[in-house]
Amino acid sequence: MKQQLAPILILFAAMLWGTTGTVQALAPDSAHPVAIGAARLFIGGLFLLIILLLSGKLDLSKIPVKATITAAICIGVYQPLFFSAVAITGVAIGTVVAIGSAPVLAGMIEMLFLKKKPARIWWISTILSIAGVILLFSNQGSVQADPVGILLALSAGLAFSAYTTVNKEVVVSMSPLPAVAVVFTLSSILLSPFLFILDMSWIFTVEGMITGLHLGVIATGIAYYLFATGLFKVSSSTAVTLSLAEPLTATMLGVFFLGEHMILPSWAGLILMLFGIGVLILSARKPRPVITK
């Protein structure tokens, strides 16, 4: 795969993640957010495992055990952390803190643990994109600066950043399809208790089945496969910044399909995010040096 294509794949993955909010709005009212997250990972993990078994590409000898387990735990705990943060502190603050903090945290993880300093273009793109996220959500949801909610949101951002960083080792060792299949199978097992603790009767309704299949197959299985494929060629910090296309997509779907309205600062934020993400994609046209300490 050419390096120029990698950011595009990650961008497409983030756009698929951005459909989750719209699809969840179509789910039955009885569907608990954490139950939706658990069902999403279970269906996504099962889908990826079936594809992997049919392809015959599973080689257990190539699994980096420590990195794989860590990645599975990170993506598994991300779901309840994020949903809990949003429930406590509101959609706007929860989303801004969790998603907005992720690129910075990913850069810090690279610098502290991998001894890599992201290039200047990454800093420019990330600052523009995070400013865009803040403006984009300036008119959405209730504002409740609850300390516990903020802490949960930061933890969610850290979990996603850590997943992306660790998963790069898994992808390089196993190739994208086996990597995402094994990681998400393990993470679905981690969250499987919620399938028995919470009410899952909604999944057997027509709306519930459509929601579960979309979130599991498209927004998880296919999306994370594209993300892992792109991650093979770009740094984890760049991948996390590109994933900010998720709230951008979610906002656009909300405006055009759910009848939501945006004020002027939100439109300005959308433009900033597009510009910031575009900077990273255009920078992939030529090799980007990585400055090491």
Image (cartoon, rainbow, N blue to C red):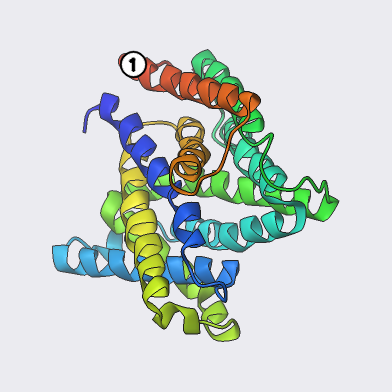
Quadrant where the image shows the C terminus: top right
Q: Residue at x 61, y 21 (%)?
A: 127
Q: Residue at x 66, y 39 (%)?
A: 96
Q: Residue at x 56, y 33 (%)?
A: 110
* Snapshot quadrant of residue 114: top right
Quadrant where the image shows the N terminus: top left
From the top left corner, tell me how far across and down residue 74 is, in percent: 55, 56
Left or right: residue 216 compared with residue 5 = right
**Is 129 drawn above or below residue 25 in the view shown?**
above
Q: Is residue 89 visible?
A: yes
Count of labels in the image: 1
The residue singled out by tag 1 in the image is 287
Q: Is residue 182 visible?
A: no
From the top left corner, tell me how far across and down residue 235 is, in percent: 44, 31
**Is 156 drawn above or below residue 204 in the view shown?**
above
Q: Identity of the amino acid at label 1?
A: Pro
Most extreme residue toward the front is: 259
